[in-house]
Amino acid sequence: LTQEEKSAVMNVARFNVSQNAPDTAVPSSTRCVLIASGKGGVGKSTVSVNIACALAKTGAKVGLLDCDIYGPDIPMMMGLGGQPEQITVDGKPRLVPKEAHGVKTMSVGYLIEDGQPVMWRGPMLHRALEQFLQDVEWGELDYLLIDMPPGTGDAQLSVAQLVPLTGIVVVTMPQEVSLTDVRRAMGMAVEVKTPVLGVIENMTGEMFGKGGGEQIANAFDAPFLGSVPLQVELRKGGDAGVPTFVSEPDGPIGTMFSDIAGKIA
């Protein structure tokens, strides 16, 4: 990075990154799972928070990393905000993940003011993701779910380089306009040599149709993890910071996410 770019990263993050950070602060035993899609607006973050909470309820130690640097939604969906605590570990600065519903989380949304745009070029984005994996005190984790932005670009390549991936979960909507982009996400899994743990079809119903997720799963010989119907409860839970799995774990949606989380596990 140029000095100007380094300064921009530090000013936005307000965190003095250690120049001698380890390769990763994520324990080697952690299962690192990307939640991805080639298309925006398919509900990756909604799926991510509900699966994370479902895994945590089983007693697993779960982290959720928001890698959507330009549109971080995890803080709102988990009911969290404010600057994360900074501590020193072995003489090096570390950020402490913010926790809710039994899930440790980290997001650039904690490090910028509400409404402040993040206008970073590729190298700056890579450094921010590197910081989240090197300079966050995650502690012992069974699972680290990584909520990815749309597309198959800089963020996806950076994460694949920075941490050993256990697998990728692909989220799609049923209609063809979504499936076209999701095929690229499936191709990305092949390129980064990471198995597809399964496909989730989100927003199934009369408006967007059904069956597209299962079609994609069959075409790529990947497991089909299930369909999540388009329900107002999911939207309300995201807005309120209480994922539907948390508010209604035994309801139809909660049971569905519990089943999907079990298949991923």
Image: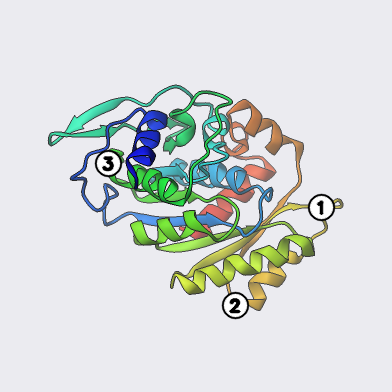
Measured from the top left, where is residue 112 in percent x and y? 47, 27
Callout count: 3
Type of amino acid under label 2: Asp
Q: CA distance from mark 3 to mark 2?
A: 35 Å
Q: Nearer the viewer, residue 242 or 25?
A: 25
Measured from the top left, where is residue 65 in percent x and y? 44, 44
Type of amino acid under label 3: Gly
Which residue bears the numbered disc 1? 205
Q: CA distance from mark 2 to mark 1?
A: 24 Å
Could you say which quadrant of the image residue 218 lies in?
bottom right
Q: CA distance from mark 3 to mark 1?
A: 40 Å
> In this rendering, would 81 be left or right of 236?
left
Colouring scheme, one of rainbow, by chain, secondary structure, one colour: rainbow
Which residue bears the numbered disc 2? 221
Type of amino acid under label 1: Gly
Task: Please tell me whether mark 1 sits on a helix, a strand or a loop.
Answer: loop
Q: Residues within 10 Å of mark 1 (few under 14, many from 20)?
A: some
Which residue bears the numbered disc 3? 139
Measured from the top left, where is residue 242 in percent x and y? 58, 30
Point 69% across, 44% down: residue: 252
First along the sequence among labels 2 and 1: 1
Instruction: Indicate whether 248 appears above or below 147.
Output: above
First along the sequence among labels 3 and 1: 3
Task: Please tell me whether mark 3 sits on a helix, a strand or a loop.
Answer: loop
